[in-house]
Every structure is written in structure tokens, then in C-alpha cells.
Image (cartoon, rainbow, N blue to C red):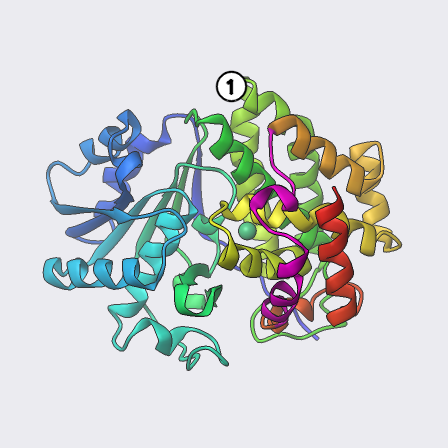
Amino acid sequence: MKFQLRAAKAIIGRDVIDLLGGEVKRFGKRVLVVTGKNVSKTEFFKRALEGLSDIDYEVWRGVKPEPDVNVIEEGVEFAKNFNPDVFAAVGGGSVIDAAKLINLCLNGGELFDYVPPPIGKGIVAQELKPLVAVPTTFGTGSETTCAAVVKIPELGIKAGIVQECLLPKLAIVDGGIELPKHIAASAGMDALMHAIEAYTCKSFDEVETYFYSGSNPISDALAEKAIELIVKNFVPSINGDDNARMNMAIASHIAGIAFGNAGVHIPHAASHAIGGLSNAPHGVCVASVAPAVLEFISDCPKVKRISEIFGCKASEGVLRIMHEVGIPTLSKLGIGRDDIGTLVENTKKLKRLLVLSPKPVGDEELRLIFEKSLSY
Ligand SMILES: [Fe+2]
């Protein structure tokens, strides 16, 4: 019976992006900056590069949203040619995850070697090159977790690779960034569900997984605070409130530490299956089953605490926020009753997350959760 606390060192605030250059130089002399096309055109990205002007750096702009195995392979080729000694990822969760996986593959072998069984070989790598992560969306918490997600198109599923070596050496969280509303909305839902799932997952003394510890007093304190901040700041942040936006950046980071240690359960397991069938962003996929899952576990004491924070039933609170920030429900993602069988089968492949559910969950329970989710 034990739990661990893993978190990246972090610098959090407004305008902290200007510190990137000085911080990166502490880790190496050849920097590969990983980003996506849209981020690379922003003023924020230009500021990120300014600090690197006196060292060797190269930019790879090839990360696409919800990247698949092919995107990672392209990045690995680019990285092999440049041969960096440090990585800087500037972008959303997809970018940070891609940088983690490119760095992992530079260790040798191919991506499938590191994907957990039964899909891959589940090889665990040791020390990788240092990664400095700069999130430009506030949801995945990837800047402070050991996890990275990749789409596997042939299998119609997303796979999560979770290894200690994927933890960034440093996170630079600049809450001054203003995002398009739909991106902030999807990311915020992801953060909210990280906190809710970390809080409600099985306790560390009831479960042992290959990586996550289960909920524990530290992750509980973090998750509860993150839920409070998100409930209070999510809608105002979407409506242009600067302070609320900063608080969402902080909350997303806190939620990242909480779930990066405790774990996540049914909504994230289901989101990997939904993300395999739909191109909807990760946060939308997670949210699409969230109210039904909260109904399913509504008799757990921690869900009652979440309801207190919302000031209404937790499931209704999540639905209300989804509505207010413009997040579609499952039926709007082009998913119908005919897909439920596939969704159940693919969700079950995420057994490593489902074991953390506070209530046992099998075929029948998953089917009911998807049916209920289609009814909203
Ligand atoms: Fe997530």
C-alpha cells in the first residue's frame, strides 16, 4: 500500500513565456522546438523563440491536432536529422504529447514498442532528453504528467503511453494567453474531468495499477481545489475575464498533478474509444460521457462533495457548464446507437483505467452509460 507524487517543476504566471530561452539553456545547447502550424503563427510563439536566438535551435511545426502514429514518425525523422540535446514543446496537449513521444522514440525502437499491451510491447524506457513544456491550451495537464496519447488509425482507438521518463523537466505555464472560445471550452472540460476522475477514482489502499496510485490525500486536496477553481472560473474565462483565464491555467495544471498521480477512470477510458470514431477534440469526447458517469457513481461520497461545490447534482452541474461553454453532447458527435457495441469493446481495452472506477464496470454498465449519454 503506497502512493507516489510526481510533478514537473513549474513556473506559472503572466508573461513567463519570456523566461523560456534562459531556462532551456540550462538543459542543453541544441533545442528542437516542437509545435503545430497554428501555434507557430502566433505572437506568443514568436516571443517563445526570442529567448532562443543565441543558441542552436530548429522548429518542427508538424504536429496536427490529436496526432496519430504517422505524425510521430515524421517528427522522429526530423529529430534524428537535427539531433537535439533538449526539447521544447510549445502548444496544446497534442504538441506536448507528440514531443514526449518523439523524445521517447529517439531512445531507440519504434512507437509500438512503447505502447502498452495488448496493442504494443509495453517497453519501459529510462532517462530521455530533457523536455521543457509550454502549454498554450489549459486542459490536458500534459506539462506535468508522465502520459502521452496517440491515435492508432488502423485500430480506431487512441493509446496512452504512461512512463516516468515522459515527465517534462520543466513546465512554463503562461496564463496570459487568450484562446479561441471552442478550444478553451474543450480544454477546460478536459481539466474539469481530470480533477473529477482523480478525485473519485478508487483509493490507493484499494487498488494497485502499473502506474497510477489511486486517489490519496494529496491528489484529493489538489483535485478538490481544481474543481472549485474550474466551477468558479470556467464560464467567465470563456467570456473574456483575464483573471478567470489565469485561474483556469492554474486549475488545469493542478488537475494535471492530481490525475497524473491518482489516475482517471471511465470518462477517459470511453474518450479513447469515442476519439477513435470521431474527430472531436479530446475534451469534448471526455465530456460527452461525463454526466452519465457521474449519475452512475452518484452514490459515492466524493460525488456528493462535488455536488456541494457545484451547488447542484454533479451530473447536472457538468451538463450546465457544457451547455454554457458550448460543448456538444455525444449524439452531436455523429455517434449513434449502432456504435455502442464498438464503443463498449474499445472502452474495455482501457482496463488499466477502468480498474480505477469507484464502482465495478463491465459490458452492461458501459452500454447503459453510452445509452444515457446519447439521451442528453
Ligand atoms: Fe484528458
Pointer 1 residue: 242
Most prominent secondary structure in the magenta stretch? Answer: helix
Q: Is residue 38 left or right of residue 313?
A: left
Magenta span includes 338: yes
In the image, residue 254 sits, relative to residue 152, either above or below, namely above
x, y percentage for residue 356?
69, 66
In which quarter of the view is residue 78 placed? bottom left
State whether residue 269 is above or below residue 232.
below
Q: For mark 1, does the 10 Å Cα neighbourhood hold few (<14), some (14 to 19), or many (20 or more) residues? A: some
Residue 152 placed where, x, y %? Answer: 41, 65
| Picture quadrant where residue 111 is located | bottom left
The reply to whether residue 356 is visible in this rendering is yes
Q: Indicate left or right for 220 with 300 as reference.
A: left
Q: Residue at horizontal 20%, vertical 51%?
A: 32
Q: Nearer the viewer, residue 285 or 9?
A: 285
In this view, 60 is above or below 364: above
Tell me residue 62's x, y (percent): 24, 49
Please name the residue shown 17% across and 63% down the image. 77
Residue at figure coordinates x 32%, y 67% from the top left: 104
Camera sees residue 213: no
